[in-house]
Image (spheres, grey):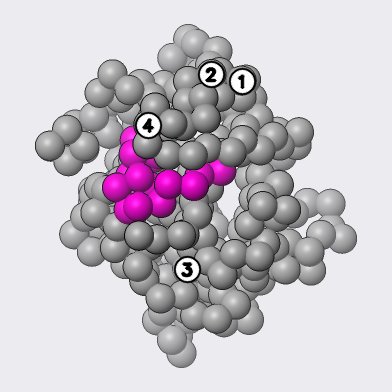
Amino acid sequence: MTNMKGAIIAAGRGSRLNSSGGKKIPKPLYKIFDKPIIYWVVDAMKRANIKNIFIVLGYKGQMIQEYFGDGDDYGVNITYVYNSSYKKDLIYSVQTLRPYLNKEKEFILSMADQLYDPNILVKFSKVKLPLNSILLCVDKKFDQIFDIDDATKILVSKNDNKILSSHGKIIKNYDYVDCGLHKYSAAIFEAINDLSKGNNLTANKVLNYLGKKAKASIWDLGDKKWADIDTIADLNAAETKMNNILLK
């Protein structure tokens, strides 16, 4: 039994998916295999025995809250956190978790628009986190990523191929792609605080800051599959890619 807690960022507007899908609902509620995308994230956490989950809400967040309730029907306990700055970078959603998770030795954080082979999260949750640092789940099977141009890339240090050197979408000679699944400690909140004097705080800036301090490392998910969903095309591709994984 693990006491590790989980967090899911579900605050964004999902403008690309809503514009192409013709709906006005939070992106995490778009369905894949007849269940909302976020259902599969919660289910993966539950399978990894992470049953205390914080969901950060923003755009039409009440719809997500109405779907899950307190989480009891899904075998988990859900606490909702509202991000009034959800139109800004996702790092502001991470910041809203500080009062709840700052004292945790470690916790898992996932985006709400990612699908994973549940075995990824089971293994990732057990990886030892270096003291006062963060860990990013990454992939290098670039040929299996539907929209590689839109993926967030990672370059690792020349001195240590486990340490993040650069994180962002505009990296030409990258080593990995960020899967949107991270393990954090209080180091993430300390970094946000260190950089908070700037008006344009972004997740990339925070992660790169930690990388320069050798406090951001990577974990390769190996041959396991995952999918990122931003558009209807992504959604359709994810159904094909994850069909034999999520429904088995």
Type of amino acid at the residue the image marks with label 3: Leu
Q: Which callout, 2 or 3, points to the residue nearer the camera? A: 2
* Marks 3 and 4, how far apart at CA: 27 Å
Q: Write the residue at 28% across / 18% down.
A: 34
* Marks 2 and 4, how far apart at CA: 13 Å
Q: Which callout, 1 or 4, points to the residue nearer the camera? A: 4
- Sequence-first disc among 1 and 4: 1
Q: Please give the residue where the numbered disc 4 appears in the rendered image.
A: 74
Q: Write the residue at 41% across / 51% down.
A: 50
Type of amino acid at the residue the image marks with label 1: Gln
User: Cβ–Cβ below 8 Å for labels 1 and 3?
Assistant: no
Q: Please give the residue where the numbered disc 2 appears in the rendered image.
A: 66
User: Cβ–Cβ below 8 Å for labels 2 and 1?
Assistant: yes
Q: Which callout, 2 or 4, points to the residue nearer the camera? A: 4
Q: Quick one: which residue is furthest to the top in this view?
A: 22
Q: Residues within 10 Å of mark 2 (few under 14, many from 20)?
A: few
Is-magenta flag for residue 45? Answer: yes
* Magenta part of the chain: 39-54
| Disc ID at residue 135 | 3
Measured from the top left, where is residue 10 in percent x and y?
55, 35
* Marks 2 and 1, how far apart at CA: 6 Å
* Marks 1 and 4, how far apart at CA: 18 Å
**Secondary structure beneath label 2:** helix
**Secondary structure beneath label 4:** helix
Image quarter in which the C terminus is found = top left
| Disc ID at residue 216 | none
* Marks 1 and 3, how far apart at CA: 31 Å
Q: Write the residue at 72% across / 53% down.
A: 99
| Disc ID at residue 62 | 1
**Secondary structure beneath label 3:** strand
**Secondary structure beneath label 1:** helix
Measured from the top left, where is residue 174 in percent x and y?
41, 66
